Amino acid sequence: MSHPDFLWRNPDPRPSYDVIIVGAGGHGLATAYYLAENHGITNVAVLEKGWLAGGNMARNTTIIRSNYLWDESAAIYEHSLKLWEDLSAALDYDLQFSQRGVVNLAHNLGDVREGRRRVNANRLNGVDAEWLEADEVKKFCPIVNVSDDARYPVLGATLQRRGGIAKHDHVAWALARKADAHGIDLIQNVEVTGFDIRNNRVRAVHTTKGAIAAGKVALAAAGHTSVLAAKAGFPLPLQSHPLQALVSELLEPVLDCVVMSNAVHVYVSQAHKGELVMGAGIDAYNSYGQRGAFHVIEAQMAAALELFPVFSRVRVLRTWAGIVDVSPDASPIIGHTPVDGLFVNAGWGTGGFKATPGSGWVYADTIAHDRPHPLAVPFALERFTTGALIDEHGAAAVAH
């Protein structure tokens, strides 16, 4: 990786980049890669206050799908899923991308109606989707409890067969390696402390190691973008919440799909190494702490054991939390900000990892051409004043 310590040895003249990306997580690294790969822009620096991909990219639960309800969401997530399907070859790196299928369980009449509606909406948008009755759920995932006396009766489920998982650290390092090969500087342990803004245009970023001049600045710091925006003088309609997850001890293969349940706030898959990966709904309070409330994880485990009695004797190996930005309509914000030359990519809620390549592709195009990519147009910041919201609360901010 690039370690251009020379940048701050001589503060005059300051080093200058065409683009500075703030945040070396999945979206920041994907944006850097696609700026070079698709647009030939390589005079780019990616700044990370910690270590490479050490934030949410290291804490997500690896789920990938595109079965979102609204046309705008389906378009960008389906674009991302299509990129996932060829990404290992494009990056020349085994991402352990596994299209094992994603099941969303329905436990009540409201779930059933919402699930069927989502399946129909997906099909109209060219996204693969199926409705499974309870017996078909059992056939697809035999270890799910679908008995009549279950605490959470399974009345059916949606299924996206093309959904699945990928190994998040492999994704981060593959993107970083390709960005580095293009000559992009990846600079770790450098925190952005402010911006040099003159005549309403960003000129440079201030960091803990000095100032760096920039033609354009792109924010991609999950969980903290609103803090950076405040330093640039404008608010973002985002709230940051902890989102908890855990892994079990290593097991023999027992679960060959992803199972989600919005109603009971739990989802589970089995990683390639063998551990079960489980997640919960977001904690209700705002926090930047990478930990969560015990009662949330306790309720998650209780629900998981009702759905999967076979897990009753499995031991928890470790728990953790990431920080998710949630916008008022649970959809991302992509594009220009009130400051010229300063761009934003935030608010993905629980959808961040699955959007990684699609987000980077669209964000890079927006930055390169100084206008929103067609897939980004609906996700502009201005929608919160025009009222053209994209309400995905049924698909985000509860389960992945």
Image (cartoon, rainbow, N blue to C red):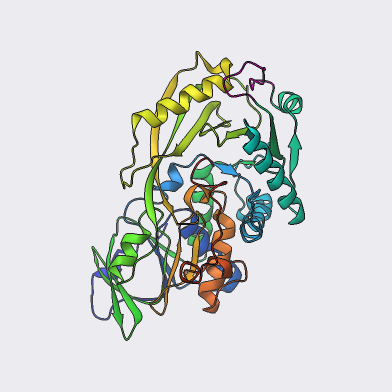
Vertical placement of residue 365 versus 311, above or below: below
Side (left or right) of 337 relative to 111: left
Q: Which residues are drawn in magenta?
A: 142-153
Seen in the picture, residue 76 relative to 279 is either above or below; the reply is: below
**Residue 222 lies in what quarter of the image?**
bottom left
Q: In this view, does 204 lie to the left or right of 246?
A: left
Image quadrant where residue 2 sits: bottom left
Predominant SS along the magenta part? loop
Magenta stretch: residue 237 in it? no
Along the line of sight, the residue nearer the viewer: 396 or 213:
396
Q: Is residue 155 visible?
A: yes
Residue depicted at x 42% and y 47%: 56
Residue 81 lies, in percent from the top left, at: 65, 52
Q: Quadrant of the C terminus?
A: top right
Residue 148 falls within the magenta-colored stretch: yes
In this rendering, would 384 be left or right of 137?
left
Extreme residue in the top direction: 313
Q: Which residue is drawn at 44% across and 27% down?
A: 299
Residue drawn at the location 33% of the way across and 37% of the way down: 291
Q: Is residue 350 depicted above or below 7 in this figure?
A: above
